[in-house]
Amino acid sequence: MLFRRWRSCLLLVLLMLSPPLLLLTQFNSATELVKLRNAMVFNVISEQEASWTPDNMPADFRAEQAPVPAWLQGIDVNGEKDLAFMLAQTAVLQPQHRRKGNAIQAGVEHTINTIAQQHSGYCADYTKVINVLAYAAGVPVREWAISFDGFGGHGHAFNEVWDQTLQQWIMLDVFNGFYAIDRTTAQPLSVLAFRHYLQHQPQQIELVQLAGSAFGFKHEQAAIDYYRRGANQFALWWANNELSYEQHPALRATAHISTHLEQVLAIMLGEFPQLKAISQPDNQQLIAQMLNLKRTLQLLIFTELLLFLLLLICCYRALRTRTGS
């Protein structure tokens, strides 16, 4: 009887391990694992829903509200809250040096120092820093993602800052050292306007390289072509609360163990930001695939929790049998 009970427990363990292992055989690269993460927080919005301004920010957007840390309190907060003012804040990143790659995946202060001193870091490290610098300077900021593999990990991240003078969002790719303007009017472009031009008037796009900054492409057309490849896979991260996120006690403790474990915990706690894909006619199949993957993962998690509960019951009964209770 005891052997049968422990055999049942072992069977439950094997049942619990089988679905995740099967999933990992299908999603076995770093970019595909990012796609799994993105699917868990994936949602869809229209272009109109993404067109909000700081004055009508959605209630569920996770805006930063944490106190500015002491190491950032010397940042300039008195200038005009426009693009030029924001660009001045990026000087701390030593943008004249070419980036060497290598994800930093650390706290904001460490990330800033690493970028400035070692000139390394991925695009997501830069967007994190810009989110915090903008917040400390009093400039509204958002973070966008573009993908080339169906809203997965093969893609790029960049920011959008609010220009108080122009009363509009302006796309800003600090990692690659440029922002975009209309070639005819010289008007800076928002991310949504930039995306529209990519799809319909790419010849109207002109890239303005940030003063003193290394440009991330061989030439302007290469940058435009790069973005055009993912023009139907733009998504808005529904948060800019980098400081609050990293100050969460459970996430801070878990980050010392594993970044991947920290992100899983953040998703489970509802602290990880939602990824809001911009819906358009030519990306409906990609969106449907992500939503199906999301439902599959939710079903898998529910099944794993149920199996874990059954395992606890099985182990409890086996132990009671062993002790003769």
Image (cartoon, rainbow, N blue to C red):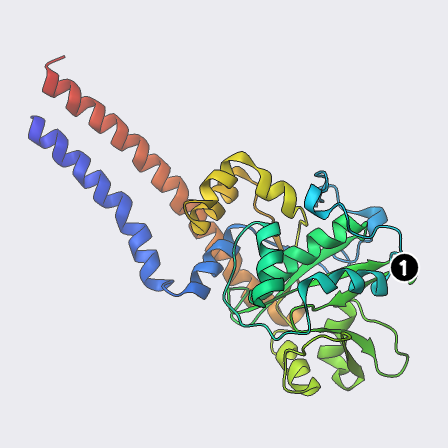
Q: Residue at x 88, y 78 (%)?
A: 186
Image vertical order of residue 250 relative to residue 53, above or below: above
Q: Residue furthest top?
A: 325
Q: Is residue 305 left or right of residue 189?
A: left
Amino acid identity at mark 1: Gln
Q: Residue 178 or 291: which is nearer the viewer?
A: 178
Q: Secondary structure at mark 1?
A: loop
Image quarter hosting the N terminus:
top left
| Vertical arrangement, residue 42 with respect to residue 312, above or below | below
Residue 205, located in which quarter of the rendered image? bottom right
What percent of the width, then of the height, locates residue 288?
Answer: 54, 61
Left or right, 277 with reference to 198: left
Crowding around mark 1 (Cα neighbors within 10 Å: few <14, some 14 to 19, many 20+) is few
Q: Which residue is mark 1?
A: 167
**Location of residue 204 with respect to 33 vertically, above or below:** below
Q: Nearer the viewer, residue 114 or 81?
A: 114
Residue 53, image x, y percentages: 82, 53
